[in-house]
Image (cartoon, coloured by chain):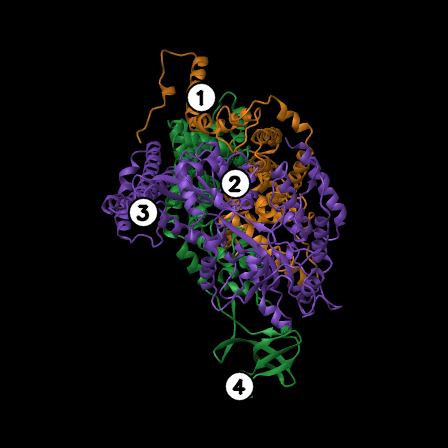
């Protein structure tokens, strides 16, 4: 075929002409078919909207119309630019496709954005993605909640916007810049809120106007929900941390389970750092079945780890050894890493690279540890995490329970998270948004969805009962969680800092540095971090 | 270098039998080239293999120790209502397949399925280093889960409509603009061309805010218009590519057409375009697949409007680096690429045919 | 479509040759501007806007947590520009970008060409399947591609190191060793090479077969044919690939963000210039300074592109000649 004779110019033009027209017609018909398809399927949606009297699908219809308009406009442009002669030829297949597609049943998964809203309801956009809540398992539950809420009242119509990290930050900023931001954002913690410093509305006057009494909350909890003195949310749920442990791995090693009560001994020894470290070593195993305590333990081929300090930044790791602040109490502009943090980081670093009881970054991301879901993989015996971690592994199937944090330097510290929902200053419907928010923070379903203990103590018993019903055959000792709530990290590991965004960034970086890098002189790295922070604090306005 | 004209003359005197002889010695090179190709492909497709096996693996297998690389199921033996995994245990009488009742560090309780009456017995040794028994068993759970939770028909349709319309817009506008740059004397053309290239130099993250503000102000946010309309105004990537091809087409061809009385538009449609079918097909495919995969733009413009999502945004809840179901993420990704793969497979036929004819007739 | 008569052929009152020539040129200019118009309109409406906007922002301290409206930002004169000179991170991140570019451009030039030659070879069995499979990674969503590469490059459970182990090599800790992170990202980009392969393939297909036949008859071997026919004939496309590889390498960012996070882990080794820009704009909310950074990148890449075009004018062979 490479040697075929060149044909005369005349005939080759003719044949090309035909093939070109054919291609053009084909392409055009595809477009029109696609457009026709779109209008054909959206048309019924528009007509059913008024028919369904109780559930007015106003927003769905509106969205569909926009789509149709969009395609028609573009199609017109396309048609205008191309030769008009091709259009009649193209409409025939388009029409048939449209007819054919209208008989196909509607898709099974119905997207229910704003479905079930009352017709006059104010649209409240709920932005999810800065913290928890954007996981595939959780989204349907959130959607179900929004649908239920929308049907339950006529004032507000909650519309969800779910954006996944890391695009969630840029997307929200583009919206804010255009003055089209959402109303409610959450769940979001201090770190997430810090990226939008100054964009959050003060909740206190809204609460006052709505007659919501904030004095029923523990002042310490309210403080926890304040950013630089401004109350940005109502306390929603508390997420104390403790040790999740895998009972199968303890059984296999013929070791007793860790204590469930503060002050209880472990195997006759005090439940302190030494006991904990030794236990973690016994629970770390290599490919040949040697424990980390064995002389011929192979650190390059570890298949089971004794301990993992859940996903958190360097401050979160530091508060294992007690809360603190990275600056001089007398002068916020001078960085000073507290001694207990220094000890904590040194211990943690050694636990990875010397004792090998904690997975380094490569192990964390490996298939063996389920690509960064360490405890779920079944190859981590103990993991320090918050109540929200119940989201992320099979709580009914895995054989697990929870234990108290060990005593370190004479005290117990269980770091605390308190994510909540916040309202943006740019929201044009602050009142309605607050109304929705005040319902959200006391909603039983949302507590379950996000695995948060209700901020209000009276609601906790019911919360645990519901949670227990989801555990299958497991019996989890939730008294540990309530006990650990008494030992929060003070000051909290997410506390405000001068130049907080950049400071948080530095702490994130430091955790990864520890996880990724062997042979560090950890003390001099901490000094480096301190001088970095010092520069950041001094640059703070 | 030999010019095209010289070659034409030489070709007419080329003895044909010589060329036919060349074609006959093809068996050895065929084996050799195919073998090399196959090896390269194996290496190149290693990640794809990983992706596919993951998509067909049960979630437990991902982190199971000593599990094979391919999708497999642990063979179990049901004893007193419990499914116990089988292990190959070396014994004095050769390797036996026993079911593990309870494993410990230095010993384990087993039951021998071929001798159940013997009951559960203790075995000294580390069961962890034993070879578990697996059978090849791809599962489709990941695919069904993905299919049930992602509205693929809707997403496919949305993506297809967006891709087709914007591809058509791109083709028409880019062919025109590339023709202008390749064949016309326009004052300041070089500057204009650099200006054209410059429009892609700014990172998309830098341009998204002003564009979003602008589109939001005219009420286009939340519609497909920001994704479709700009396609009708040419883009630098495709104009540049087409211009390079157009400039490679001998000028005598369009000069001849113009002597015959064709105006530039006719010359473009009947001379340039047929000669540049490979480039045009390439641009079609690129733009189509670019739109298919474009994530950031549709996300920003359509966030919250799930009815309008294209596939890239619609699957994000599964295919995200923070997701907790890697196997399902892979299955979702496989599902999304099946359609483009088929389209490509079919399109390349057209592509190669179009190319061969132009290659010869120059 | 109706045949329109070319106006230039209608004689008007015995024009002089000079007049006629300029009339023809005028006519062609009008046609040229007509063909150029879609882009030019688009440029004025969609494309210049972001550039002007970025320029404007570079004189402000706007932060994207507020609506873009006067009163929500201040003009800060040239202070963002002054900051460029005292910011060591610019040089660091530019260094990362250049390191990546220096590997990515030659790879992106040679490997897809080799692939295109392979799938263009008439000795290859089932070339259409090869073409499809080589193209396939291009249609995989970026996030999925990143997940796959995080999997295969993991130093503990990844297939790449597993393969190396068979040959007795202990593979590097790709994604956590600062020395290997950039090559790992290069591998990731190399995977999605289908587009470049296709461009080369189209160009290879367009080389007149007669040229090869003639050269063969003249006694030129495969290598000579490749260097003296193929390369010059596809040089316009090679040039295209070089320019775009450079621009794309300077814009490379999303995969780096997904793998190295916002801090350019490990140890800042993947802190690309664009990631640095992204941090300023979206992490630290400093749109003003970020815009200045974007403009600096704009200027650098423009200079590079102009230089490449200068070079290209001398070394690219266009069968149709320069217009």
- The reply to whether callout 4 and callout 2 are in contact (CB within 8 Å) is no
Question: Which marked residue is nearer to the observer: mark 3 or mark 2?
Answer: 3
Q: Name the residue under label 2.
A: A169
**Helix, strand or loop status at disc 4:** helix
Report, in whole angstroms, how far the alpha carbon at label 4 lies from the one at label 1.
Answer: 93 Å
Report, in whole angstroms, how far the alpha carbon at label 1 lies from the one at label 2.
Answer: 48 Å
Q: Name the residue under label 3.
A: A116
- Comparing B22 with A142, the one in front is A142
Dot 1 surroundings within 10 Å: few (below 14), some, or many (20 or more)?
A: some
Q: Chain C is drawn in which colour?
A: orange
Query: Chain drawn purple, letter?
Result: A
In the rendering, at what x and y percent does residue A289 appear? Answer: 67, 70
Is A301 left, or right, of A128 in this rendering?
Answer: right
The answer for which chain carries disc 2 is: A
In the rendering, at what x and y percent does residue C267 appear? Answer: 68, 45
In the rendering, at what x and y percent does residue A209 appear? Answer: 42, 36
In the rendering, at what x and y percent does residue C80 appear? Answer: 62, 26
Q: Residue at x 35, y 37 (%)?
A: A70
- Comparing A110 with B183, the one in front is A110
Q: Mark 1 points at which residue?
A: C29
**Helix, strand or loop status at disc 2:** helix
- On screen, residue A311 above or below C92: below
Query: Chain drawn green, letter?
Result: B
Residue lying furthest left: A51
Is A266 left, or right, of B250 in this rendering?
Answer: right
Is the residue at mark 4 from the same chain as the one at mark 2?
A: no
């Amino acid at each position: 075929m490479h040697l075929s004779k060149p044909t005369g110019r005349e005939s080759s033009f003719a044949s090309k002409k035909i093939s070109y027209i054919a291609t053009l017609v084909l392409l055009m018909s595809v477009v029109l078919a696609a457009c026709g398809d779109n209008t054909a399927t959206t048309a019924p949606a528009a007509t059913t909207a008024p028919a369904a009297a109780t559930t007015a699908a106003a927003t769905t219809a509106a969205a569909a119309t926009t789509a149709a308009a969009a395609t028609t406009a573009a199609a017109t442009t396309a048609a205008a630019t191309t030769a008009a002669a091709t259009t009649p030829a193209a409409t025939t297949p388009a029409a048939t496709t449209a007819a054919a597609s209208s008989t196909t049943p509607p898709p099974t998964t119905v997207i229910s954005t704003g479905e079930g809203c009352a017709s006059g309801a104010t649209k409240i956009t709920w932005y999810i993605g800065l913290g928890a809540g954007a996981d595939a398992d959780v989204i349907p539950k959130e959607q179900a909640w929004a649908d239920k809420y929308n049907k339950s009242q006529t004032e507000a119509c909650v519309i969800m916007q779910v954006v996944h990290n890391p695009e969630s930050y840029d997307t929200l900023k583009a919206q804010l810049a255009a003055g089209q931001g959402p109303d409610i954002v959450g769940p979001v913690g201090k770190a997430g809120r810090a990226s939008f410093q100054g964009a959050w509305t003060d909740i206190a006057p809204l609460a006052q106007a709505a007659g919501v009494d904030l004095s029923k909350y523990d002042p310490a909890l309210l403080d926890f929900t304040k950013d630089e003195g401004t109350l940005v949310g109502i306390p929603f749920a508390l997420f104390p941390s403790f040790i999740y442990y895998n009972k199968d791995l303890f059984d296999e090693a013929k070791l007793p389970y860790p204590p469930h009560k503060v002050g209880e001994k472990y195997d006759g020894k005090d439940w302190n750092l030494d006991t904990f470290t030794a236990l973690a070593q016994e629970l770390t195993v290599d490919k040949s079945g040697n424990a980390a305590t064995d002389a011929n333990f192979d650190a390059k081929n570890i298949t089971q780890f004794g301990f993992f300090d859940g996903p958190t930044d360097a401050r979160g790791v530091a508060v294992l050894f007690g809360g603190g602040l990275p600056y001089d109490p007398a002068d916020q502009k001078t960085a000073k890493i507290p001694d207990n943090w220094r000890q904590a980081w040194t211990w943690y670093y050694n636990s990875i690279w010397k004792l090998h009881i904690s997975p380094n970054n490569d192990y964390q991301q490996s298939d063996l540890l389920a690509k960064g879901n360490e405890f779920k993989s079944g190859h981590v015996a103990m993991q320090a995490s918050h109540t929200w971690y119940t989201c992320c592994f099979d709580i009914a199937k895995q054989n697990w329970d929870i234990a108290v944090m060990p005593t370190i330097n004479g005290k117990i510290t269980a770091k605390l998270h308190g994510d909540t929902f916040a309202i943006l200053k740019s929201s044009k419907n602050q009142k309605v948004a607050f109304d929705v928010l005040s319902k959200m923070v006391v909603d039983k379903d949302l507590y379950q969805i996000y695995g948060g203990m209700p901020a209000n103590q009276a609601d906790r018993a019911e919360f645990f009962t519901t949670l227990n019903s989801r555990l299958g055959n497991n019996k989890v000792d939730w008294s540990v969680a309530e006990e650990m709530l008494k030992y929060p990290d003070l000051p909290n590991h997410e506390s405000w800092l001068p130049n907080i965004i950049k400071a948080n960034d530095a702490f994130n970086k430091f955790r990864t540095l520890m996880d990724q890098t062997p042979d560090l002189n950890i003390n001099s790295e901490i000094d480096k971090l301190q001088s970095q922070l010092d520069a950041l604090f001094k640059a703070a306005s | 270098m030999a010019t095209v004209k010289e070659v034409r003359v030489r070709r007419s005197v080329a003895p044909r039998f010589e060329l036919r002889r060349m074609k006959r010695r093809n068996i050895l090179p065929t084996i050799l080239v195919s073998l090399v190709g196959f090896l390269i492909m194996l290496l190149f497709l290693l990640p794809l293999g990983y992706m596919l096996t993951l998509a067909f693996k049960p979630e437990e297998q991902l982190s199971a120790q000593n599990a094979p690389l391919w999708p497999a199921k642990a063979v179990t033996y049901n004893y007193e209502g419990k499914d116990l995994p089988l292990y190959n245990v070396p014994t004095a009488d050769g390797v036996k397949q026993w079911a593990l009742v309870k494993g410990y560090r230095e010993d384990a309780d087993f039951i021998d399925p071929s001798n159940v009456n013997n009951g559960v017995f203790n075995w000294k040794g580390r069961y962890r280093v034993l070879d578990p028994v697996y059978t090849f068993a791809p599962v489709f759970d990941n695919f069904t889960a993905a299919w049930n939770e992602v509205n693929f028909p809707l997403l496919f349709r949305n993506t297809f409509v967006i891709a087709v319309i914007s591809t058509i817009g791109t083709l028409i506008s880019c062919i025109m603009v590339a023709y202008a740059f390749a064949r016309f004397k326009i004052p300041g053309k070089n500057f204009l061309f650099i200006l054209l290239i410059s429009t892609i130099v700014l990172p998309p993250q830098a341009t998204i805010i002003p564009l979003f503000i602008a589109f939001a102000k005219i009420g286009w946010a939340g519609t497909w218009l920001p994704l479709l309309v700009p396609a009708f105004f040419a883009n630098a990537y495709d104009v540049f590519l087409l211009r390079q091809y157009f400039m490679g087409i001998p000028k005598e061809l369009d000069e001849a057409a113009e002597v015959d009385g064709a105006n530039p538009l006719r010359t473009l449609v009947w001379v340039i375009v047929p000669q540049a079918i490979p480039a045009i097909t390439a641009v079609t495919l690129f733009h189509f697949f670019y739109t298919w995969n474009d994530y950031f733009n549709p996300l920003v413009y359509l966030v919250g409007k799930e009815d309008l999502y294209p596939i890239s945004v619609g699957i994000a809840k599964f295919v995200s680096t923070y997701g907790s179901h890697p196997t399902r993420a892979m299955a979702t990704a496989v599902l999304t690429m099946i359609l483009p793969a088929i389209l490509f497979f079919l399109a390349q036929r057209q592509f190669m045919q179009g190319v061969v004819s132009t290659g010869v007739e120059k | 479509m109706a045949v329109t008569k070319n106006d230039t052929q209608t004689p008007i009152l015995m024009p002089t040759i000079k007049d006629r020539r300029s009339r023809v040129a005028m006519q062609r200019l009008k046609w040229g501007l007509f063909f150029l118009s879609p882009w030019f309109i688009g440029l004025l409406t969609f494309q210049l806007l972001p550039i002007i906007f970025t320029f404007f922002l570079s004189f402000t301290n706007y932060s994207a947590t507020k609506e873009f409206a006067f009163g929500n930002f201040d003009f800060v004169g040239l202070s963002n520009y002054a900051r460029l000179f005292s910011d060591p991170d610019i040089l660091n991140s530019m260094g990362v970008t250049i390191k990546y570019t220096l590997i990515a451009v030659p790879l992106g030039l040679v490997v897809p060409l080799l692939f295109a030659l392979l799938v263009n070879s008439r000795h290859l069995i089932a070339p259409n399947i090869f073409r499809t499979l080589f193209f396939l990674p291009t249609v995989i969503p970026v996030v999925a591609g990143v997940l796959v590469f995080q999997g295969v490059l993991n130093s503990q459970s990844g297939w790449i190191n597993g393969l190396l182990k068979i040959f007795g090599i202990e593979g590097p800790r790709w994604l956590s060793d600062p020395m290997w992170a950039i090559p790992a990202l290069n591998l990731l980009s190399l995977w999605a090479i289908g587009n470049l392969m296709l461009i080369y393939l189209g160009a290879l297909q367009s080389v007149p077969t007669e040229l090869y036949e003639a050269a063969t008859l003249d006694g030129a071997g495969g290598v000579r044919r490749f260097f003296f026919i193929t390369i010059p004939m596809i040089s316009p496309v090679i040039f295209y690939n070089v320019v775009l590889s450079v621009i794309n390498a300077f814009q490379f960012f999303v995969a780096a963000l997904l793998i190295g996070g916002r801090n350019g882990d490990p140890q800042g080794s993947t802190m690309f210039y664009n990631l640095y820009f992204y941090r300023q704009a979206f992490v630290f909310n400093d749109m003003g300074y970020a815009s200045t950074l974007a403009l600096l990148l704009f200027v650098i890449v423009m200079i590079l592109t102009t230089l490449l075009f200068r070079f290209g004018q001398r070394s690219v062979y266009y069968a149709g000649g320069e217009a």
